Amino acid sequence: METNKNNKGSEVGGPSNGMKTIFITIFQGAEAKNILRTDIYKTLIAHGDTRIVFFVDTAERAEYYQKEFSHPRVIYEVSPLTTPRGVDALFSSLGFLLLRTATTDLRRKMALEENRRYLHYWFSLIANHILARRWVRKLVRALDYRLIRSNVFTEFFEKYNPAAVFLAHLFDDHEISLLREARRRSIPAIGFINSWDKLTTRHSLRLLPDSLVVFNDIVKQEAMTYADMKEKDIFVSGVPQYDWHVNYKAVSRETFCEKNKLDPTKKIIVYAPMGKAFSNSDWDIVDMLNKIITERQGRDAQLFVRFQPNDFVDERELAKRPWLRYAMPGIRFSRVRGVNWDMSFDDIKSLTDTLANAHLFICYASSMSVEAAIFDKPAININFEVKEKELMSKSPTFFYKTEHYQKALKSGGIRMPKSKEELAAAINEYLTHPEHDREGRKRLVREQCGLLNGKAGQRIAEHILLWQ
């Protein structure tokens, strides 16, 4: 596709004063966290000739964000999410067959364990081995672009005549509709892979943007291998949400402990649960850790649990443990775990405060291991089951086999005890010698964070502005 970098938002339908309009999607909590609450938004809106149209899925979300991110050059448009039908649904379902990674193989086995559809499993596996090829993906994308017709976003393009489109979740069919409309109008589209696992976990990209922004060189290579992006069209930015860890000065230990009702004389061990969507073991681990810590010689440590912002916590389980100190960040827009959530600036700052003031982090497969390493804090990943005969979908150790997390584990910056006894030993070792595995943590940060200088958000915004 020919790209028109000089497309002006001041033409018919655009602002009369030469202002350029950028379309940005924030249908998911992760998008809002990566864009609104980083220097992406701050840098874009600082340009006086730039207007931003944010797309959200509900009026509730629009009202929520508008209260905090209101500006004369910011507009919120509601575009309810749609479900693909007919041929559109066919192309959507093909995506999983066109991507073959260690993670997609695991997802297929996980589905088989749950539904016992053996014929479907073998058909899918064979089709995947045949179809997951670059030339097939290229052909399917060409047909997808030519055969699918959608007018979902047509009125917005006619109304605003955007100069560029920024899509932060290319794995969503609704956003692909926006990308398709931009391509048909020769309007530059910049995509953003806003998580380290999506290119190897979800499905192949239905359509490709003109430029793709990625966190690091690992994801860059994945974009070339699995998304068929050309190297020249990939921009490595660093991780915008990690800018906070560089630019924000964490509160003192005394303030942190007072806020979270912790004992400032004791070391802090943080446990980050997987959440009930992926594990039935979180409360068992909480009790196990509490027992290990209270039985530790000298009793010089304490447990602090930081729950996920996109999951719901069982209040009955909390009531059973009045001794538990915890943080429950985020606001949920739905009644079930999913993408409809948000973290406030205070929530984000509290994460940095936790990382800066804790002594040790314990979790399963989680980006928390990377963030702990940024602060040179030891991370332990529990590598044993506390419940027998769990389905893979509820087995937290299952996720260690995923492709993206295997790359993190190879850094040597994460300890993986295989029993309760090894877990207790690792806790004692790290509390006594936090410098152990430091070189591995440095390697983990170097590989997963890319350029970590507090300017990733600014770099992404400046890259977007180049396409106006």
Image (spheres, grey):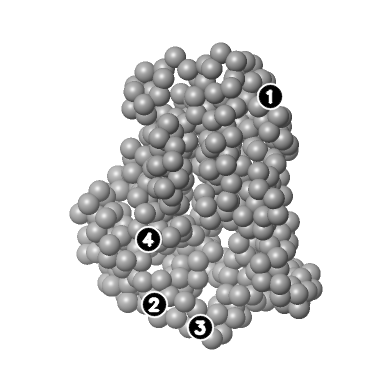
Front residue of 269/208: it is 269
User: Element type at marker 1?
Assistant: helix
Structural distance between the alpha carbons of marks 3 and 4? 24 Å
Taking the image as shown, residue 317 lies to the left or right of residue 206, namely left
x then y, percent, for residue 112: 71, 68
Label 3 sits on residue: 85
Q: Name the residue under label 1.
A: 425
Q: Are marks 2 and 3 in contact (CB under 8 Å)?
A: no
Q: Residues within 10 Å of mark 4 (few under 14, many from 20)?
A: few
Which disc number belongs to residue 334? 4
Against 328, residue 79 (above or below) is below
Residue occupying the far left of the picture: 72
The mark that comes first in sequence, 1 or 4, is 4
Q: Which residue is drawn at 62% across and 55% down?
A: 394
Q: Which residue of the protein is positioned furthest toward the front in this rendering?
A: 320
Give the mark, 2 or 1, whose residue is nearer the N terminus: 2
Looking at the rendering, which quadrant does residue 88 occupy?
bottom right
How far apart, in angstroms, are the residues tagged by discs 3 and 1?
54 Å
Numbered disc 4: secondary structure:
loop
What residue lies at 54% left-to-right and 23% top-to-bottom?
Answer: 294
Q: Are marks 3 and 4 in contact (CB under 8 Å)?
A: no
Badge 2 element = loop
Q: In this view, does 408 lie to the left or right of 165?
A: right
Q: Which of marks 3 and 1 is in front?
A: 1
Pair 4/2: label in front: 4
Classify 359 as above or below 231. above
Q: Are marks 2 and 1 in contact (CB under 8 Å)?
A: no
Which residue is disc 2 drawn over? 152
Specify the amino acid type for callout 3.
Arg
Circle 3/circle 1 CB separation < 8 Å: no
Which label is found at residue 79? none
